[in-house]
Image: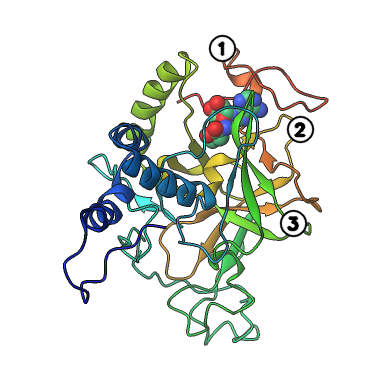
Amino acid sequence: MLKPMNYNRKKPSRIEQLSDVAAYVLPYLLPAELSAVALTCKTLHLFVKSVTAVRSSDACRNYEKLPVPFVNSTVDNHRYAYFIYSPTQVLSLPDDPRRQPWGLCFDGRPDLNLVLPPTVEDGGKCECERCDGDTVACPCSRLKLPGLKWECGSCCTCGLECGNRVCQRGLSVRLKVVRSRRKGWGLHADQFIRGGDFICEYAGELLTTKEARRRQLIYDKLASTGKHTSALLVVREHLPSGNACMRINIDATRIGNVARFINHSCDGGNLLTVLVRSSGALLPRVCFLASRDISIDEELTFSYGDTGLNPNGSQCFCGSSCCSGIMPSEHT
Ligand SMILES: C[S@@+](CC[C@H](N)C(=O)[O-])C[C@H]1O[C@@H](n2cnc3c(N)ncnc32)[C@H](O)[C@@H]1O
């Protein structure tokens, strides 16, 4: 791996100087720029190979406890997919956030975490281990609504190890991103996963509905060329009456985490989509839990929605017995 040079020695050789510059510059380059650099000389070609190896070894860029490797043994020459990593939701960025170090041997991470202001809400029975159901004293007491999961948050004094903060600990099951001929990249289990286990949050840019509609039009146009995949998820939070009350638009196309690689399955797949509210957070997070036991190597999938909504959607290759042949897409 490339390392910035140690200046305690006497005058560095030319190759050492080049290696030093490469260690600082190459990790910020986009794939097309890296390819151009690789063409310039044999030495830079080797440096680029080393950066590519680091990139394909961990889609999470070291942001998570566990690495998630890209696996493409035979399908084509794509070694990894480029995107900006964020472990959680971020507010939509106005400018194109195109560069983030990847392939570095030192820590130069930008802070993309969204810190939301605390809110106060009372009522209901708290599941927090620390409070033992004491609804009066606990700052994380919440009124329970069906279809929602409540968790303690940063304003509770319990730590991340609290049994009621399972969906905030980042990746804790082994996963891999595997290339397939017809669906592109897909997220797979790299260990046995028990039903009910937390898999990951759907991280990405939080968009207004107006911006989500604008981007969806662009993505639909690009998708018709067959060369572009998008990852814009629209989730509606429902009132107990069943009426939609809030629409959450998360776009992981430019910024996101490994959830952006989860493909659609017409049979509903093996993941549950759960809205998780934690105390102190203004907005719920969209999280994936295993809906049943999942074996090692199995692909993780969920249903993108109702296929009947858009008969002009692109072709579905989920392979399930109830496959409609058409991918669902959001009517915006
Ligand atoms: C959220 S991305 C999933 C990751 C994507 N496969 C990739 O390579 O980055 C959604 C895109 O994946 C592809 N996809 C997902 N599920 C699919 C399926 N069942 N059949 C065909 N393509 C699928 C479509 O191109 C879709 O727009």
Q: Looking at the picture, does residue 72 appear above or below residue 115? A: above
Q: Looking at the picture, does residue 8 appear above or below residue 256? A: below
Q: Is ligand 1 within 8 Å of the beta carbon of the residue shown at mark 2?
A: no
The residue carrying mark 3 is 191
The spot of residue 324 in percent (x, y) is 73, 19
Amino acid type, residue under disc 3 in the picture: Gln
Q: Which of 16/275 is in front?
A: 16
Amino acid type, residue under disc 1 in the picture: Asn
The residue carrying mark 1 is 312
Q: In 3D space, how far apart are the residues under numbered discs 3 and 2 (Cα atoms)? A: 22 Å
Residues at discs 1 and 3 in contact (Cβ within 8 Å)? no
Per the image, label 1 sits on a secondary structure element best described as loop
The residue carrying mark 2 is 267
Q: Which of the 4 quarters of the picture holds residue 46?
A: top left
The spot of residue 262 in percent (x, y) is 60, 40
Q: Which of 112/71 is in front?
A: 71
